Amino acid sequence: MAKVKIFFSILVIFTVSIFAQMSYENWELFKEVYSLVKNTYIDEKSSDQIIVGALKGLANATGAESGYIPKEKVEEFEKIANLNYQIPFYITKDEGFARIMSVFGENGTGVEPGDYLRIIDGNSAFDMSYPDLQRMIKSDEEKEFKCEFLKKGTLKKYAKTIKSVKYEEPKLFTLPKNQKVLQIRCLESDISPKLKEELEKTTSPIIVDLRNCASDNIEKTLKWCGFLFGKGEVKCSAKGGYRSLQFEGEGVLSSKKCALLVDKTTARGGEILSMVGSAKFSLIGENTFGFASQHEKLILKNGDALVILIGYFLNKNGEEVKEKPLKPDFVIDKMDEKNSEKIYSEVVEKLSF
């Protein structure tokens, strides 16, 4: 009995210490909302349901791509990184809305960067956390999704059936004057021995096209950093300071003449590659999206998980890439109005490749 009293005394002290950090007004507001939900809401809600709902809201408030994962879905979430199919967009959560950052795969879907995903297979994307959304849009085989979108600018609704696609493999091709283009859309794709061999034997200047590259897989991003640029590190802000993430690899571009082509669809992993590459090569194009963050998954005592934002990657000036796009060394005007052939020609001309 004495042990039980001690346990509850410690629990009370812990609880009081947490809520002591809240203002009196906020604590009273929390109690008021809890009571209203418990006693007024027409459908019966248990105390556990209300608290879990509050925890989800707390998790979502920690960052655009954070979220709370119930224990029964944790295993499913852990498999996401190994799935090879996704609807052909990279998406972020922007004040609750699911915003299209970039589009990969076959063209012609009519969906553009900046559009909002509203509904997917009858589920509101607004009501999903980012981890929920990732579990929805990724799969291990081709699937069809009935989606509703809001068009950027006008917010006009439109509906489309979207097929998931396999992550696009990098493409290496030759321009009319023998310069090369390495087009990288999906950092989830594997680095093939064939690509390694082709890049190693290339003596021509290479344009690394990172448009529409917006993967959130940091582990695979660092592998690409090592493969392309060799051994190095990237810095990330952290609570009370910063941390360094190391990478190493073949560095197949280290001795080449290269440039990195970026635009507003270059985000997250694409921006990390741009930051690393810009230490040696020129950035050309237009400002990037301006969001490169690191998240961590924490398993709670009850088996649930919390995905939480723990830092932002730092640019070469030590500034967080948080609503702060990377600026190119050489600007290409009105990229939206030009096809890729014209853009590559302008890169060649500006850099005398």
Image (spheres, helix red, strand yellow):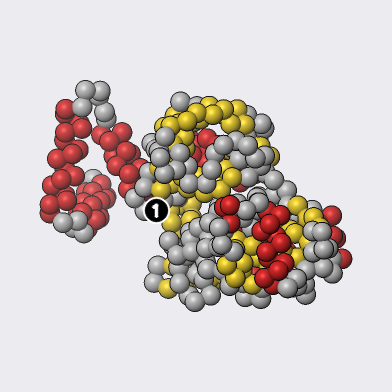
Residue 151 placement (x, y as % from top left)? 45, 39
Residue at position x 40%, y 38% in the image: 155
Residue at position x 79%, y 64% in the image: 179
Q: Quadrant of residue 167?
A: top right
Of residues 2 and 69, the one nearer the viewer is 69
Residue 188 placement (x, y as % from top left)? 65, 50
Of residues 301 and 40, the one nearer the viewer is 40
Which residue is under mark 1? 63
Residue 204 visible here: yes
Residue 214 visible here: no
Residue at position x 78%, y 55% in the image: 172
Of residues 332 and 198, the one nearer the viewer is 332
Q: Is residue 142 above or below residue 266?
A: above
Q: Is residue 127 above or below residue 66?
A: above
Residue kind at label 1, given as amino acid type: Gly
Residue 282 placement (x, y as % from top left)? 64, 72
| Secondary structure under the numbered disc 1 in the rendered image | loop
- Quadrant for the C terminus, please: bottom right
In the figure, is residue 171 to the left or right of 331? right
Residue at position x 48%, y 46% in the image: 114
Q: Is residue 209 above or below residue 87?
A: below
Q: Is residue 86 above or below residue 238?
A: above
Q: How many marks?
A: 1
Residue 214 placement (x, y as % from top left)? 57, 53
Of residues 6 and 95, the one nearer the viewer is 95
- Quadrant for the N terminus, please: top left
Decide: few, some or many residues near mark 1? Use Cα within 10 Å; few <14, some 14-19, many ≥20. some
